[in-house]
Image: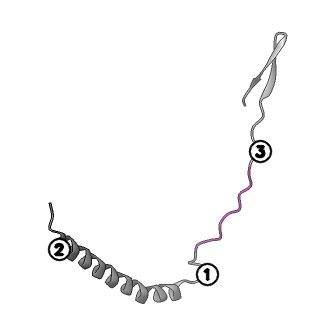
Amino acid sequence: MRNIYEVMRQKEADIEQLKKELQALRVVAPLLEEDLTPEVQAPPPVRTYPTPPAKPIAVAVGADTKPIWP
């Protein structure tokens, strides 16, 4: 079993590392945002339209008919 104080120290060290990373991201994010130009930005999403479900085609087989999917 691990020592609870060692686990707490490790968690606190992890939190401090995350704080440093967040601070670095806060500094860099505005710089990256300024670098974006209209031709570099991602294109707008493509509009998609739902397709209707396929309908079975009835094929005459003798006297009865059965649906066949295309």
Q: Earlier in the sequence, mark 3 or mark 1?
A: 1
Chain part drawn in magenta: 42-50
**Which residue lies at the image location 37% right of the left edge and 87% below the top edge?**
23
Q: In which quadrant of the rendered view does residue 68 lie?
A: top right
**Front residue (pair 29, 70):** 29
**Front residue (pair 70, 9):** 9
**Which residue lies at the image location 32% right of the left edge and 84% below the top edge?**
20
Q: Amino acid at mark 3?
A: Pro
| Image depth: mark 3 or mark 2 in front | 2
Label 3: which secondary element: loop
Left or right, residue 22 beside residue 4: right
Q: Amino acid at mark 1?
A: Pro
Q: Which residue is mark 2?
A: 5
* Percent coordinates x, y for residue 41 in the rendering: 58, 77
| Image depth: mark 1 or mark 2 in front | 2
Left or right, residue 65 beside residue 39: right
Q: Amino acid at mark 2?
A: Tyr
**Which residue lies at the image location 46% right of the left edge and 89% below the top edge?**
31
Q: CA distance from mark 3 to mark 2?
A: 62 Å
